[in-house]
Image (cartoon, helix red, strand yellow):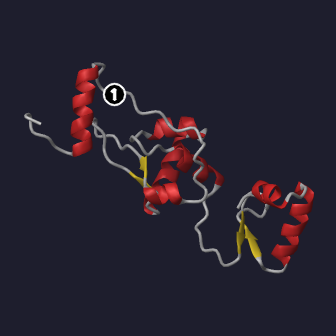
């Protein structure tokens, strides 16, 4: 839980909650995601949820579920440099928070999985990355290519 959420629930000041959290940490009842900024995320000491770094959290929150997009657009939405986004996406793939089908041009595209959506650090209100620019400009061709991409394969009569 974030420190600001605790402030809202308890109706205390930020300073009062900060002092309370430091006492609970000293007693071994809570742990902090970041010791430099203990107010960022506070967890019960027995909570085994895997934590993401701030950049990983921003990248995960920027990945859409409705469509797949590329690392460049994810980096722009998350405000993380593209070279760093590739490293983060690989780590998210290993944790199965993201899937990576290949697009029409053979480039890797990314889409968030249900496990990624369920992660407590995935911000539902975050700005989502835009879809990559299609290889064609015609709406009819784009619809046909999207249908083929979504189903995997189609016959002409379908």
Q: What is the quadrant of residue 126 in the picture? A: top right
Q: What is the quadrant of residue 144 in the picture? A: top left
Q: What is the quadrant of residue 28 in the picture? A: bottom right
46 up-or-down from 85: above or below: below
Q: Where is residue 136 in the image (x, y as percent from the top left)?
A: 28, 23
Does the image show residue 14? yes
Image-based side of 134 in relation to 24, left or right? left
What residue is at 46 percent from the left and 55 percent from the top? Answer: 90
Q: Where is residue 97 in the image (x, y as percent from the top left)?
A: 47, 57
7 up-or-down from 86: above or below: below
Badge 1 is on which residue? Answer: 134
Farthest residue toward the top?
A: 138
Dot 1: what SS?
loop
Does the image show residue 91? no
Q: Position of residue 103 (x, y in %)?
A: 31, 40
Task: Please state, as top left, top right, bottom left or bottom right, where the N terminus lies in the image.
Answer: bottom right
Q: Where is residue 125 in the image (x, y as percent from the top left)?
A: 60, 43
What residue is at 63 percent from the left and 57 percent from the top? Answer: 53
Q: Compare residues 130 and 5 and report the one nearer the observer.
A: 5
């Amino acid at each position: 839980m974030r420190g600001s959420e605790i402030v809202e629930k308890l109706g205390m000041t930020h300073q009062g909650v900060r002092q309370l959290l430091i006492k609970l940490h000293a007693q071994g009842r809570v742990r902090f995601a970041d010791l430099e900024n203990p107010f960022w995320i506070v967890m019960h000491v027995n909570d085994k949820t895997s934590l993401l770094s701030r950049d990983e959290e921003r990248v995960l929150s920027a990945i859409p579920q409705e469509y797949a997009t590329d690392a460049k657009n994810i980096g722009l939405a998350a405000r993380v440099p593209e070279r760093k986004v590739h490293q983060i996406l690989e780590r998210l793939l290993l944790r199965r928070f993201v899937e990576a089908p290949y697009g029409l041009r053979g480039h890797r595209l990314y889409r968030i999985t249900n496990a990624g959506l369920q992660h407590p650090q995935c911000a539902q209100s975050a700005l989502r990355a835009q879809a990559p620019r299609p290889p064609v400009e015609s709406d009819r061709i784009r619809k046909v290519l999207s249908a083929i991409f979504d189903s995997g394969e189609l016959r002409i009569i379908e």
